[in-house]
Amino acid sequence: MQCLIIYMYSPKFIFLFFLFSIISIPPFCFAHPKENKINIGILNGYQLYLKKYSQKYRIITWDGHLSTLQKALSQNKSPVDILLLNEKIAEQACNLGLLIAFPEDLLSSNDKQCNFQTITDHITLAWDTDKVHFNPTWKDFWNITQYPGKRGLQKDAFSALSIALLADDVPFDEVTEVLSTPAGILRAFKKLNQLRPYIVWWTTPNEANFLLHKNQVLMTSGSILSISAFQKQYPLSHFQYQYKNTIENPIVFSIPATIPTQRIKLINSLLQHPSFLSFPSADPKQIMQETIVKEETNSFQQPTVSLDDIFDEWLVLTKQ
């Protein structure tokens, strides 16, 4: 499987690479074991933010799926040195032993952690400006009768169910609390059921961008960081997004467990450097002034069931 690598030689090459990487992107790939260049696996949708680092590091895009990571690491080759992935996926991968847990001197607590340098993104409402000529709300997102068309949603339990509660008139600062109760979860799923036939699920930020770019949906949830970078690449893109009622979406850097031992010290030192792969933010002052739903670690927990488990079961039962 051939790796897709970003080289910044010319604007034409950048455009062709980006277009090709979206249409025909391999799920994951490996570095050549004899190469000393640090290889970083970037969740598809954030690579435009990191293109300025491509001469220093080898940037490889991947789909962010836990199954993809498991398959790649099981091949026991020389994997990427550092991964950028969703915080929730990182926690699952850490528990499965797929990522290296950082030494205690790098942590602020004694809990096992496998992520470093958390970056805060936000899931927002984006829409097709050619067809929607006002700033819609999440209630409008559910209004299929007045605004017919498909809707894009992130295939993530907390994101999808939080948006459903926002559409059901739950104030943003009460969403997490409501979703921490069985009654609140039932309320969210009842609302989500209303939209189910019209939902197009996405898993990586760029999938959401292209749902709008290719006129496959009228509205979608999407990553603010990824959308803003996409719009710079495609200045004539016919969609817009808003900062109000967003869902916090942390992404993190981690180290695969199969990294060669002799590289661990090098990568640890690199991750401790404050300037390593700094992400520009999409107007952070405006985001801070707006309404943000944040997932709490003490939200609905049962010994044998989780919100993600319930959501996955619901997806199976409602699959068409």
Image (cartoon, grey):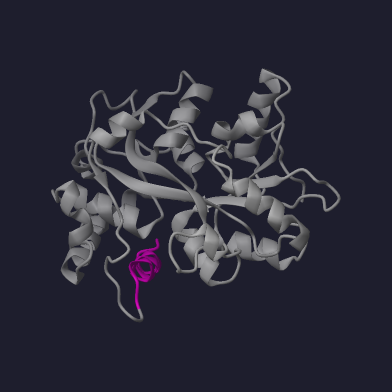
Percent across and percent down for residue 259 are 71, 60
**Residue 188, image x and y in percent?**
22, 59
Taken as a whole, is the magenta stretch helix, strand or loop? Answer: helix
Q: Is residue 312 magenta?
A: yes
Q: Residue at 49% of width from left, 22% of height from top? A: 232
- Report how many numbered discs are placed on residues in the image: 0
Tell me which corner region of the image, top left, top right, bottom left or bottom right, holds residue 60. top right
The magenta region covers 305-320
Q: Residue at x 70, y 68 (%)?
A: 74
Q: Residue at x 28, y 36 (%)?
A: 288
The answer to if 66 sits in the magenta stretch is no
Name, please, the residue furthest toward the right.
34
> In the picture provided, is 301 more to the left or to the right than 19?
left
Q: Quadrant of residue 273?
A: top right
Coordinates of residue 230 in the picture (x, y in percent): 49, 29
Foreground residue among 301 and 260: 260
**Near-viewer residue (152 or 248):** 248
User: Is any part of residue 239 visible from this angle?
Assistant: yes
In the rendered image of this protein, does residue 219 appear above or below residue 272? above
In the picture, the quarter occupied by the C terminus is: bottom left
As drawn, 110 above or below 161: below
From this viewpoint, which residue is outermost toward the bottom?
304
Q: Is residue 233 left or right of residue 257?
A: left
Q: Nearer the viewer, residue 316 or 65?
A: 65
